[in-house]
Image (cartoon, rainbow, N blue to C red):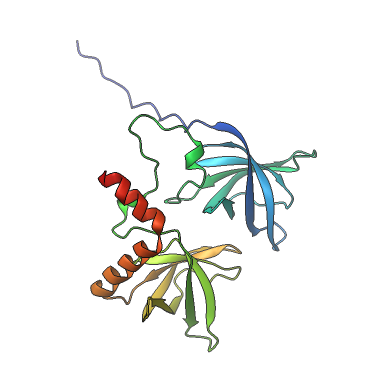
Amino acid sequence: MTGISGPNPPMPPPPRIPVDLDLRVWGMGADGHPFSQHARARNISQGGALLSDIERDLKIGDTIAVQNGEKKARCKVVWLTNTRSAQKIKVGVQLLKEQECPWATLLPQAPGQMPATGKAQRRWERHKISLGITLRNDRSTLPLRVNATDVSARGCYVETLSPFQIGTALTAEWFCGAQKLISRTFVRSCDPQVGMGIEFMGLTTEQQQRFQQYLRAMNPFACSIEHANRN
């Protein structure tokens, strides 16, 4: 008699590794005011971390940003507790979807396993470089000059304390070498007091390809990875 198997058991959560890691954390506190400070990561995993030494009260469900060295990522606050001790407020955070893990190099990798970055799911590879962009809102004559990170020919993430609401239409201007590019853009994600993700909607395929080549040339780390993979 053939037995009937039940549903597949749930996947175990990613293993957490104990650490004592200095990070920069910023965002908006529960009081509605922006904050930026150093904190400690007490344990880390591929999908999140336990942070301590947080000085500002936060709200569950809010988005904050963390930085480890040159690596930045946006996280959601999933739980918090005030320890009333030297470790101040402890916060559990979960990396947002498609965010590159900023402490991936500190995690053990299974044989043959590549760090999960989400790049394989993207048509245009994103590059962790700094790019100056000027944004113009139809409702204002004043340009907004911002610093874009996590850039590709499809869009970028803009760090700003005053992000626009999701769906806001903007005009973006920036330089690709000596060539000035202008594109209609839309805000696709908004993290209050942290930044926003915008999508380029007005670039031709030729402009996208040229811009992507420019980004790769500006990102020596990406070029070194490609050379290592070929070898």
Residue at (55% x, 50% y) in the render:
76
State the residue in front, 66 or 128: 128
The single residue placed furthest to the bottom in the displayed view is: 141
x then y, percent, for residue 222: 37, 54
Quadrant where the C terminus sits is: top left
The single residue placed furthest to the left in the displayed view is: 1
Residue at (73% x, 53% y) in the render:
56
State the residue in front, 196 or 110: 110
Determine whether 183 is above or below 74 in the image.
below
State the residue in front, 46 or 211: 211
**Label total for image:** 0
Residue 46 in sight from this viewpoint:
no
Please state if 50 lies on the left or on the right of 81 as rendered. Answer: left
Please state if 80 lies on the left or on the right of 108 as rendered. Answer: right
Residue at (74% x, 50% y) in the render:
55
x then y, percent, for residue 118: 37, 49
Residue at (47% x, 41% y) in the render:
104
x then y, percent, for residue 100: 45, 49
Quadrant where the N terminus sits is: top left
Determine whether 111 is above or below 156 in the image.
above
x then y, percent, for residue 107: 49, 35
Q: Quadrant of residue 127?
A: bottom left
Residue 185 in sight from this viewpoint:
yes
Determine whether 161 is above or below 49 in the image.
below
